[in-house]
């Protein structure tokens, strides 16, 4: 067991500042590199360019040709330009309120159940609602559900059936009304597959590096133990093994101690 094992995380701003200062002093990072990272994280995400052209242009459907970027820009103008959950300005992302993969899943399920029969609004809406309930997603309005159901219905009722329909159905979730701005962290927490993400201090990658740099586990085994005790959602050991390379590099620079494992 290393001394660092039961050490508490920093709490006050001055303790966090001290931690960063320590990294700079050990030449693990320079102040200008820190500034670059912070500014990069604060840069508002590219919207019109990526959002409107993403997804094979499925946002475009609702707008005249060439008007999608404009629609995206005015949509952003109407939003709070920060995380809708925690107000952070850092690492903002556009997130689908009713997730794409859920819409795709329901679309494919409906196709299997009903074959090529044309579907009505209610059938599609009910199927979406049931799946949302199953996945414990409740932060959407009825108005939004209607809009997404309408678009999914439109996709399913296309004749001839869309090319690559199985995959294309996810784009029925692409409506500006179905988007929100979340910080990377809140976005990770909002995904059902990352249900545990909220329990550790940082997203997995940052948390791994923080454990190494602050708690300084002396062996790989101890590192994994610390990670697990902090509820990191790391499915495979490989993620820890990859993160451990930082410790190895720091050891080779003489600023980290790794003890041989038995
Ligand atoms: Zn947030």
Image (cartoon, grey):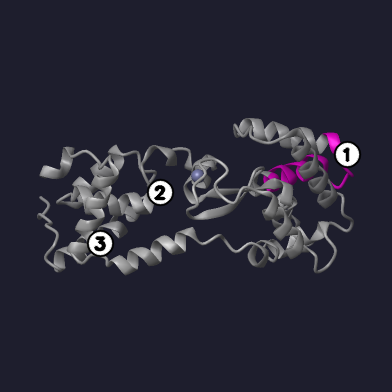
Query: Which disc is residue 203 wearing?
Result: 2
> Of helix, strand and loop, which mostly describes the magenta segment?
helix
Q: In which quarter of the image is residue 229?
A: top left
In front of the other: 172 or 38: 38
In front of the other: 75 or 244: 75
Disc 3 marks which residue? Answer: 246
Query: Which disc is residue 106 wearing?
Result: none
Magenta range is: 103-122
Mark 1: give few (<14), some (14-19) or many (20+) Cα within 10 Å.
Answer: few
Residue drawn at 87 percent across, 49 percent down: 157
Q: Do the residues labelled 3 and 1 touch (CB within 8 Å)?
A: no
Q: Is mark 3 on a helix, strand or loop?
A: helix
Residue 162 visible here: no
3 or 1: tag closer to the N-terminus: 1
Q: In this view, does 37 lie to the left or right of 230?
A: right
Disc 1 marks which residue? Answer: 120
The answer for how far apart the CA atoms under marks 2 and 3 are is 17 Å
Residue drawn at 37 percent across, 64 percent down: 35
Q: Position of residue 202 (x, y in %)?
A: 38, 47
Q: Where is residue 236 in the image (x, y as percent from the top left)?
A: 36, 50
Q: Where is residue 78 in the image (x, y as percent from the top left)?
A: 70, 50
Q: Are marks 2 and 1 in contact (CB under 8 Å)?
A: no
Compared to residue 144, the image places residue 219 above or below, namely below
Compared to residue 176, the image places residue 12 above or below, namely above
The answer for how far apart the CA atoms under marks 3 and 1 are is 55 Å
The answer for how far apart the CA atoms under marks 2 and 1 are is 41 Å
2 or 3: tag closer to the N-terminus: 2
């Amino acid at each position: 067991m290393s001394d660092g094992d039961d050490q508490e995380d920093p709490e006050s701003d001055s303790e966090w500042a001290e931690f960063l200062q320590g990294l700079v002093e050990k030449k693990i990072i320079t102040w200008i590199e820190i500034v670059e990272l912070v500014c990069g994280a604060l840069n508002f995400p590219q919207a019109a360019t990526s959002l409107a052209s993403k997804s094979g242009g499925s946002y475009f459907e609702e707008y005249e040709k060439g008007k999608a970027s404009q629609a995206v820009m005015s949509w952003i103008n109407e939003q709070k330009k920060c995380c809708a959950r925690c107000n952070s300005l850092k690492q903002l992302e556009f997130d689908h309120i009713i997730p794409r993969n859920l819409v795709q899943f329901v679309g494919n399920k409906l196709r299997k159940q009903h074959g090529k029969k044309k579907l009505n609004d209610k059938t599609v809406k009910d199927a979406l609602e049931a799946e949302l309930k199953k996945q414990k997603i409740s932060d959407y309005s009825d108005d939004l559900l209607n809009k997404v159901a309408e678009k999914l219905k439109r996709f399913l009722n296309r004749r001839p059936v869309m090319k690559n329909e199985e995959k294309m159905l996810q784009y029925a979730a692409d409506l500006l009304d179905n988007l929100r701005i979340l910080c990377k962290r809140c976005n990770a927490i909002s995904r059902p597959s990352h249900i545990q993400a909220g329990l550790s201090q940082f997203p997995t990658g940052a948390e791994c590096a923080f454990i190494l740099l602050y708690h300084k586990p002396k062996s790989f085994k101890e590192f994994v133990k610390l990670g697990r005790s902090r509820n990191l959602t790391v499915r495979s050991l490989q993620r820890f093994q990859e993160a451990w390379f930082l410790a190895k590099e720091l050891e080779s620079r003489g600023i980290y101690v790794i003890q041989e494992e038995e």
